[in-house]
Amino acid sequence: MLDKETQLAVEKGVMLPLMEEFYTIQGEGYHTGTAAYFIRIGGCDVGCHWCDVKESWNSELHPPTHSNIIVENAKKHAETVVVTGGEPLMWDMSNLTAKLKNEHLKVHIETSGAYAVTGQWDWFCLSPKKNKLPVDEAYNIANELKVIVFNKHDFIFAEEQAAKVNKEAILFLQPEWSKKEQMTPLIVDYVMKNPKWRVSLQTHKYLNIP
Ligand code: SF4
């Protein structure tokens, strides 16, 4: 149970349940291969059965951490920060992103888009999930749409999502890691037939880095 003051700071986004933070290489999507400092915020109620960060779901397991501390750590390491989760937009991201931008860091997000958009983002990676669809604003501002392909039905879902996202968004299909042997050849074939899509792979997992 958080004390009242901490609870209030979390509600305002001045403190956030920080699961982990680490400097690595962005493995997926448009910025694949580029160095970035990852800030993983705890808490997610979207409930994807194949989720590879289920430890993030319960925000109470992750200590409320002041945004000043997160920013101090980030700026030591990188020019680009990726805020991920969990589902970071369960929290008010305004305070954290204002402070990161104040330090002239580029601020990216990876989100399911299921919650109202808060914060200022230089790159908005929308990865919609069937269980809890994105809000309209997420479709409108997404720079990148990344659909995870777990089974064949996900190609239909991907097209439904592509029809909703703004026209400038770059479209990616990414095999879910445990299904990559089955799904990657289907994705390759699909992208060749439907070249508005690009293939995204979880290259950090092939590289054995976080
Ligand atoms: Fe996991 Fe992301 Fe799905 Fe949440 S939205 S359950 S963190 S894959």
Image (cartoon, rainbow, N blue to C red):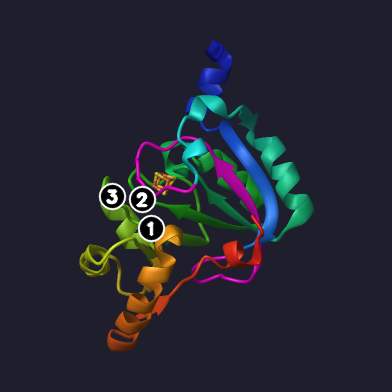
Label 1 sits on a secondary structure element that is: loop
Q: Which residues are magenta?
A: 27-52
Which of pointers 1 and 3 lies earlier in the amino acid sequence?
Answer: 1
Give the side of residue 26 with respect to residue 55, left or right: right
Residue 190 picture location, percent across and down: 30, 81
Crowding around mark 3 (Cα neighbors within 10 Å: few <14, some 14 to 19, many 20+) is some
Residue at the disc numbered 2: 113
Residue contact between numbered discs 3 and 2, judged by CB atoms under 8 Å? yes
> Disc 1 vs disc 3: which is toward the camera?
1
Q: Specify the amino acid type for callout 1.
A: Ser
Q: Nearer the viewer, residue 11 or 46?
A: 46
Residue at the disc numbered 3: 135
Vertical side of 31 occupied by 85: above or below: above
Mark 1 lies within 8 Å of ligand 1 (Cβ measured)? yes
Residue at the disc numbered 1: 127
Residue under the image location 55 percent in, 26 percent down: 61
The Cα–Cα distance between marks 1 and 3, rounded to whole angstroms, is 12 Å
